[in-house]
């Protein structure tokens, strides 16, 4: 079977109070990048952070991260658009990535487009109550078209992020409209714990996604799990020819003793190898995806 492409999701907006190994500073991010490449990752997904853990969507910080990661690794870089942290106006979320891409030295290989909007409440099953009940992750179709056009203009590969089947249908429509080129790179964004917007991280949750992924076009699919343990699904993903995106940014992995990113990636690689899948190098991932 094909080599398995591993994306490391090293920090998101997770806090050191959840796992002290979450990288915030440029130094911490670069050290983490070196570690996850050694462990088998090919793609680095990172969020710029302030020293106290806030969101840093500035071009300067992100450019410094990319330059230094490239000086020390071969990883494909995949920054964020800024999620809710960068929402002056949703369509402006692409501006940082577009600015980075104007200089080949800091042009990301890949950038994410979440192909739909979502309620991002905090469901507390113990108390049966909702927190963040007003929070909406807004991605209008007009914004998506703007992101896709901008990424094409600046030569960055879009990663289509699907939280549920409706998102997949919209991603396919963007491809049909000629806004996103094949081969597609699609992330099935499973959710667990207090996040109830995505499919659950179960075989049924994964199968529901795969049932609506057309077989007649080239789409490389990968899977992450926000708020829960992805490892239990890694063997299934590996057997079905998928890839995975894992990191302590999505979930602190208390059951593994709050590991660092490299330790977590190594454990996932062990599970994938047991299914006969070896990790793609960054050069191989580049060949497959770009
Ligand atoms: Zn992210």
Image (cartoon, grey):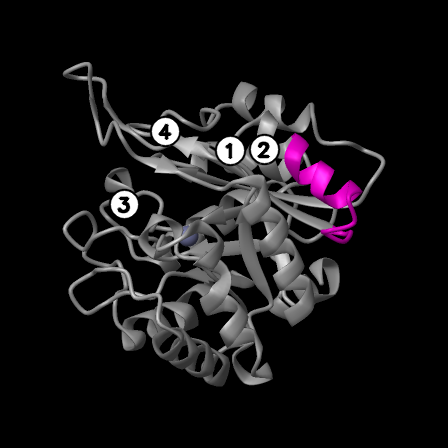
Which callout, 3 or 2, points to the residue nearer the camera? 2
Which of the 4 quarters of the picture holds residue 62? bottom left
Which callout, 2 or 1, points to the residue nearer the camera? 2
Residue underneath mark 1: 163
x and y, in percent, of residue 164 in the image = 54, 28
Q: Residue at x 43, y 32 (%)?
A: 118
Horizontally, residue 204 falls left or right of residue 290, namely left
Q: Which mark is residue 167?
A: 2
**Which region is colored magenta?**
169-183
What is the distance, in whole Å, between disc 2 and disc 4 at their CAs?
Answer: 18 Å
Residue 173 forms part of the magenta stretch: yes
Q: Residue at x 50, y 32 (%)?
A: 233
Mark 2, other Cα within 10 Å: few <14 / some 14–19 / many ≥20:
many
Residue 271 forms part of the magenta stretch: no
Tell me: is circle 2 under 8 Å from ligand 1. Answer: no
x and y, in percent, of residue 173 in the image = 72, 37
Residue underneath mark 4: 192
- Taking 205 as reference, is 190 above or below it? below
Residue underneath mark 3: 252
């Amino acid at each position: 079977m094909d080599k398995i492409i591993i994306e490391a999701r090293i920090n998101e907006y997770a806090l050191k109070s959840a796992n002290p190994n979450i990288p915030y500073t440029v130094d911490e991010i670069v050290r983490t990048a070196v570690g996850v490449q050694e462990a088998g990752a090919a793609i680095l997904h990172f969020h710029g952070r302030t020293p106290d853990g806030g969101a840093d969507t500035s071009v300067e910080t992100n450019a410094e991260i990319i330059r230094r990661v490239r000086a020390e690794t071969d990883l494909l870089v995949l920054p964020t658009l800024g999620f809710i942290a960068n929402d002056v106006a949703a369509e402006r979320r692409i501006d940082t990535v577009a600015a980075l891409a104007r200089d080949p030295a800091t042009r990301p290989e890949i950038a994410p487009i979440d192909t739909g909007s979502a309620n991002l409440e905090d469901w507390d099953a113990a108390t049966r109550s909702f927190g963040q009940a007003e929070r909406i992750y807004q991605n209008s179709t007009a914004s998506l078209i703007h992101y896709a056009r901008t990424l094409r203009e600046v030569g960055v590969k879009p990663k289509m992020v699907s939280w549920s089947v409706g998102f997949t249908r919209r991603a396919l429509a963007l491809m049909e409209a000629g806004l996103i080129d094949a081969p597609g790179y699609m992330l099935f964004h499973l959710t667990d714990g207090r996040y109830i917007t995505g499919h659950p991280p179960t075989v049924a949750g994964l199968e529901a996604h795969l049932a609506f992924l057309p077989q007649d076009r080239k789409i490389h699919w990968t899977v992450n799990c926000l708020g829960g343990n992805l490892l239990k699904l890694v063997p299934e993903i590996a057997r079905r020819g998928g890839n995975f995106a894992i990191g302590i940014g999505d979930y602190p992995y208390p059951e593994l003793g709050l590991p660092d990113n490299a330790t977590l990636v190594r454990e996932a690689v062990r599970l994938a190898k047991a299914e006969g899948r070896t990790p793609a190098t960054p050069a191989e991932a580049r060949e497959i995806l770009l």
